[in-house]
């Protein structure tokens, strides 16, 4: 158990819909990362937050947004869903402060868009 | 920007042999290079990492080497075992951003 909690574990929805994925980082970790992993694909970096502020942005679509709340949990919002958005979405947290360090991944949220 | 190329995409070795996976990065400012292992249906987990002020690091059967001049780093697994079968990801990091390679599916044949 990494200490990172993601909900829901599985989600099935239709094209055009909107979903919210939730992540609770390890106790004490201030950084939260979101990654997308499509079938047999690598880990695509989406976005990173540190103590409530956006710190780095990757290839995140405009239809996607995220935020980190004062209690440090984070939410990834995916809207106007398309079939190609079906993927495993990982959240990870890190306690390295200003330096990049070990990421602790959650179990992921598997999104299926029909 | 950051871009990590990882080779090979698949690798099959006999149990007991060595496996080597290589990654090339583009951002000269990157200073952190971890390797993650992802078993089927599970989350990625860190197996070893190296920072840019070190050329080599070893942990039992696993070692990582870094060539800053050439901007590449490699994962070496010796005396491979069936439980080493997994997908391995390299990554480059700088200022909290961590970008992963496309992964290498390693299969250990008994």
Image: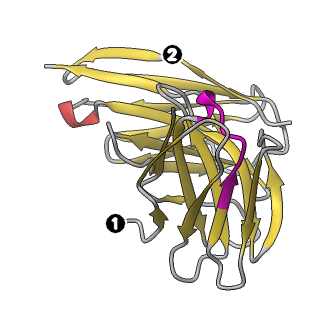
Q: Is residue A9 above or below residue A87?
A: below
Residue for point 40% across, 41% down? B38
Q: Is residue A4 magenta?
A: no
Residue for point 68% across, 56% down? A77
Q: Which residue is mark 2?
A: B8
Residue B52, percent from left and from top: 71, 48
Residue for point 46% across, 52% down? A108
Quadrant for residue B25, please give it. top right
Residue for point 65% across, 69% down? A74
Query: Does A13 sit left or right of B13 as displayed?
Result: right
Query: Does A38 sit left or right of B16 as displayed?
Result: right
Q: Which residue is mark 1?
A: A1
Query: Does A31 sit left or right of B36 as displayed?
Result: right
Is residue B20 visible in the rendered structure shown here? yes
Q: Is residue B14 above or below residue A102?
A: above
Foreground mark, 1 or 2, reads 1
Q: Secondary structure at mark 2?
A: loop
Residue B106, percent from left and from top: 36, 24
Chain of the residue on which disc 2 is drawn: B
Disc 1 from disc 2: Cα separation = 30 Å
Residue A112, percent from left and from top: 48, 38
Q: Secondary structure at mark 1?
A: loop
Q: Is residue A84 magenta?
A: yes
Q: Is residue B49 above or below residue A72?
A: above
Contact between marks 1 and 2 (CB within 8 A): the answer is no
Q: Nearer the viewer, residue A83 or B11?
A: A83
Q: Nearer the viewer, residue A18 or B83?
A: A18
Tell me the tag on residue A60: none
Chain of the residue on which disc 1 is drawn: A
Which quadrant does the C terminus of chain B fall into?
A: top left
Q: Which residue range is magenta in the image?
A: A76-85
Residue A99, percent from left and from top: 73, 65
């Amino acid at each position: 158990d990494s200490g990172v909690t993601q909900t829901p574990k599985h989600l099935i929805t239709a094209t055009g819909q909107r979903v919210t994925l939730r992540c609770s980082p390890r106790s004490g970790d201030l950084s939260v990362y979101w990654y997308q992993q499509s079938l047999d694909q690598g880990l695509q970096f989406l976005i990173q937050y540190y103590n409530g502020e956006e710190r780095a942005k990757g290839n995140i679509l405009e239809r996607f947004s995220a935020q980190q709340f004062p209690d440090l949990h984070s939410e990834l919002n995916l809207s106007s869903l398309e079939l190609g958005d079906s993927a495993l979405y990982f959240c990870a947290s890190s306690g390295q402060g200003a330096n990049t360090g070990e990421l602790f991944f959650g179990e992921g949220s598997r999104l299926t868009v029909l | 920007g950051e871009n990590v190329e990882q080779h090979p995409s698949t690798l099959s070795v006999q149990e007991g042999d060595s496996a080597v996976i290589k990654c090339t990065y583009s951002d000269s400012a990157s200073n952190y290079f971890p390797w993650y292992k992802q078993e089927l249906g599970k989350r990625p987990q860190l197996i070893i990492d190296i920072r840019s002020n070190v050329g080599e690091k070893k942990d039992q059967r696993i070692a990582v080497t870094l060539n800053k001049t050439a901007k590449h780093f490699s994962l070496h697994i010796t005396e491979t075992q069936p439980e080493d079968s997994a997908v391995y990801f390299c990554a480059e990091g700088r200022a909290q951003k961590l970008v992963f390679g496309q992964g290498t599916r390693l299969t250990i044949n008994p």
